[in-house]
Amino acid sequence: MSDRDTIVALATAAGGAVAIVRVSGSDAERCASLVWQGRTACPEGEESRCNGPRCTHGSPEPGEPASGGIRMENSRHRALASAPARTLVLGSVPGVDGEVLAVRMPGPGSFTGEDVVELQCHGGTLVARRILGCLLEAGCRHAEPGEFTKRAFLNGRIDLTQAEAVADLVGAHSESALRLANRQLDGLLGRRVRAMREALHGLLCEMEVRLDFPEEDLDWRSEEEVLGTVREACALMDQLIASRREGEILRHGVSVAIVGPPNVGKSSLLNAILGRDRAIVTEIPGTTRDTLEEFAHIRGIPVRLTDTAGIREPGDRIERSGIERSHEAARNAQLVLWVGEATRPESVESIDLPEFEVPLLKVANKADLLSEGIASSLGEGVVLLSALTGEGLDELYDAIERAVWEFPHARESDVAVNARHAALLEEARGELNEVETLVAREEWELGAICLRASIDAIGRVTGDTIAPDVLDNIFSEFCIGK
Ligand code: GDP
């Protein structure tokens, strides 16, 4: 397997109306020409005739097989090669039902930087699989997960943060996650990181020249100026590292566990948030015996909600295991909603959970059954609501939003790093701390070593300096066809 092979994959998910087969590599046009035949290879001025079902332009010559996959005959190569770049051309693949549109995107201006051809056919796996099979026979090989994006990176079309944004874009569960991925794909994070790296690199060059020619009295930056550049980079790094939480939340969502005694309305609350009846709601306590996970958006935050079995003295073995799972769900969550009944304030206040360090919001449900006197006996910070009428849900969303962001989140950040970026930036930041101390002591030689290490770590964020096995790791997370 080599990075020079011509690769092919289905670029669309199953179930769509249209399927796209993507080919990339130096042989892309030749392979696609063997499989696909155009109908628009006609004399100028006759194009309009050529798109109809009766069109004979580009159809098999007399004596040629009408079907059978690959055509080794040469005359069709021209059909694709002469098609205008980045323009859909009508045609077909012998042996495959229906029309197949082709578009050729010559390198180096294509997404991967190589010659790319995409064939669009009717959706449904069969047709596309047939075309894929023909292309494999023509000499392509199956693309590995993320291989198209990896090639785009290796050919310098995008940096590593942009490559990661492609995966984020596919996995985005919310509008804000999508916006974030788009900005990253646009190169915003990469540009910011690279500018910081360049500033530090300029400093390193100067420090090294200073070491090589100590006797020269050139116009060196003062110690204060050096420290200023280092501190500026530190501040930017701190800002980026702090955006990790937001990045993680937007990329992966927040896990919220709904726990509490039986029959207080946990399943009803899940249904009310989802806006549909997902969980079974009954007046019989102990009916939810297992956890149930659903996905929702609360104020633009992707949320994984887990409804759990009611917590009480277990009646049988099945209930005990359900309750153990409730404890586990609470422990693993990023936020716990402890639900009790507004008419029984003690059910809201006496939290029957093992000790753990997860933020918890107290919810008093069934507010519709409440008389005013009882409402005032609820403790501070308790969210009063009715899953039945929907009253108080907005207050719950406010409280969840506050708990998730830990501060009023008026404006979303323009960039937000992921765990990999944050780890590298922390490493780079640690080295810069050393640089600060060493420069202050005028230990230029050691300072330069730490500065180089810092620059190297920053370079790994954008992929300017990175080991091949790390790259393989990153791209293996992608889906095939991307
Ligand atoms: P869970 O066992 O905690 O999941 O509770 P359920 O959601 O199954 O609800 C238990 C009972 O309480 C059902 O009969 C629900 O209709 C009722 N219930 C749930 N929420 C409310 C509410 O806000 N108001 C009233 N009046 N009844 C509710």
Image (cartoon, rainbow, N blue to C red):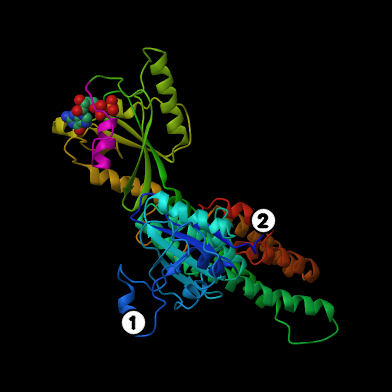
Q: Amino acid at mark 1?
A: Glu
Q: Which mark is residue 46?
A: 1
Is the residue 8 above or below the residue 306 in the image? below
Please provide percent x and percent y for residue 443.
79, 69
Q: Which range of residues does the magenta coloring cover?
A: 266-283
Residue in the image at 53% along x and 62% along y:
163
Please provide percent x and percent y for residue 471.
63, 57
Q: Is residue 454 left or right of residue 58?
A: right
Q: Residues within 10 Å of mark 2 (few under 14, many from 20)?
A: few
Is the residue 225 above or below the residue 369 in the image? below
Q: Amino acid at mark 2?
A: Met
Residue 239 in sight:
no
Q: Farthest top residue?
A: 316
Quadrant in which residue 275 is drawn:
top left
Q: Is residue 32 left or right of residue 361?
A: right
Q: Farthest left residue?
A: 371
Q: Is residue 159 magenta?
A: no
Label 1 element class: loop
Q: Which mark is residue 1?
A: 2
Figure quadrant, ligand 1: top left
Residue 337 in sight:
yes
Q: Respond yes or no on whether mark 2 lies under 8 Å from ligand 1.
A: no
Q: Residues within 10 Å of mark 1 (few under 14, many from 20)?
A: few
Separation of disc 1 and disc 2 at Cα?
Answer: 44 Å
Q: How many dots with numbers?
A: 2
**75 and 212: which one is in front?**
75
Q: Which mark is residue 259?
A: none
Please provide percent x and percent y for residue 210.
79, 79
Q: Are marks 1 and 2 in contact (CB under 8 Å)?
A: no
Residue in the image at 70% along x and 81% along y:
221
**427 and 238: which one is in front?**
427
